[in-house]
Amino acid sequence: MASSDTRTQLLDAAERLFAERGYRGTSVRAITELAGANLAAVGYHFGSKAQLLAAVVRRVIEPINAAQCAGLDRLLARTSQPRVAELVEAFAGPLFDVITEGDESSAQTSQLIMTILSDPAEEMRSWNGPVEDLVRDRYLAEFQRALPDLSPPELWFRMRGLLAVTAVDRVEISHRRPVTGPSPAAGEESRRFAITFLAAAMSAPPTRT
Amino acid sequence: MASSDTRTQLLDAAERLFAERGYRGTSVRAITELAGANLAAVGYHFGSKAQLLAAVVRRVIEPINAAQCAGLDRLLARTSQPRVAELVEAFAGPLFDVITEGDESSAQTSQLIMTILSDPAEEMRSWNGPVEDLVRDRYLAEFQRALPDLSPPELWFRMRGLLAVTAVDRVEISHRRPVTGPSPAAGEESRRFAITFLAAAMSAPPTRT
DNA sequence: GTTTGATTAAAACGAACGTATGAATCCCGG
DNA sequence: CCGGGATTCATACGTTCGTTTTAATCAAAC
């Protein structure tokens, strides 16, 4: 089982470094050094740096997607017409859970998500699979039912805003220089702030055209 | 004036490439080639690649900041108690103006802003100056006055959400693979959607603690 | 026309990168 | 004990990077 252990440590190290420094800013040498493995281990276990990234992203995204899916199932089992705030919580909650669940890598997981979404590197855009699309489409349909007055383009705009806020806002703080303003919200508080913020935003009356 | 011309063309090329590929994904060679200049031109005119980036960012950010500042001045000259939606528009509007003003580089400018905000590279975090802090603090104070029930941490959270939505949401689309959903909002429509979305979000009642 | 300072050009440097290779080592069924 | 697949190791390869250097070119002042 020594092999699988090395594999996991490579994934852990890569997740942390990709989050901290981005894909291009992280060298295979830095990853293997942090993992306590040999330089060639990445090539052996994953084939290439890009495929290691894909494995890292999959490991992070999959539980989030599963939780989003399960949350929606739970909601729909309880009521056929969920409220907007409930949809927001079911969608955004898992993103915060993975971030705030307390283990040491949690803070950097949000950075990784952000990096994934914003990194212009081509390798960053090859992981998105049919599962992710399916989850997004299910939420899109439910939001459409809950907000029937919203035109599809505006709903689509708001869905992206939803993702932007959950993904971005803790990151922006965490990897910028110390801010002189009020201290940022953390953990559970941040989650509740986000639900409030986003539920109001999603529920706004349609922009008159 | 030939010298200054090379300088400008380097700035233009760097702005475009940094936006498209990120800082680390852009080589000095690619910049000088696109600018029609010699490889050593970057070193001569800017000292280093990092200082070139700083010059690019300054050139993009400064007019935005000036517009944000002027918009707030205009608002405060008209009324001593601006509404939240007006503050949102004055703050977010310039970010959309620079994006949608029609010239060819506009689409990539938003990507550059996004890259600046999210790139983990250390060089990306050295441009923020006292001017930017001043503008942000002025808006922070006005939002605090317009939303007196909001605790400072929650207000701070919302300010970051404000920036996240304006910066992120058009970019996420523009540099990902084609999406199967409804077509994204563009230009002026996107701006109005954002104002609606963000005004509602900023105006939400405080999260009960 | 020559000198002077500013700019551009061509070439090279050392370092870091991702990847590939072949030998060494480990682990376990026989 | 041993044989063989799985894994780790040290090392090297070829490329690309940012930067530097030195010479060539230009524009204008004297």
Image: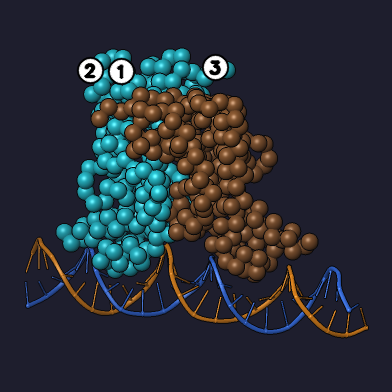
Chain colours: A cyan, B brown, C orange, D blue
Does B93 appear above or below A147? below
Tell me the kind of residue under disc 3: Arg
Query: Which residue is disc 1 drawn over?
Result: A82
Location of residue A73 in the rendering, given as x and y in whole percent from the top left corner: 26, 24
- Name the spot of residue B63 as percent of width and height, x first: 62, 44
With B197 as the anchor, is A54 left or right in this view? Answer: left
**Rendering coords of residue A153 (x, y %):** 51, 24
Image quadrant in which the N terminus of chain B is located: bottom right
Name the secondary structure under disc 2. Answer: helix
Tags 1 and 2 touching, CB below 8 Å: yes
Task: Name the residue carrying label 2.
Answer: A78
Residue B40 is drawn in which quadrant? bottom right
State which tag comes first along the sequence, 2 or 3. 2
Of callouts 1 and 3, which one flags the residue occurring earlier in the amino acid sequence? 1
The amino acid type found where label 2 is placed reads Arg
Residue linked to disc 3: A208
Residue at 38% across / 25% down in the picture?
A: B204
**Residue at x 56%, y 57% (from the top left corner):** B54
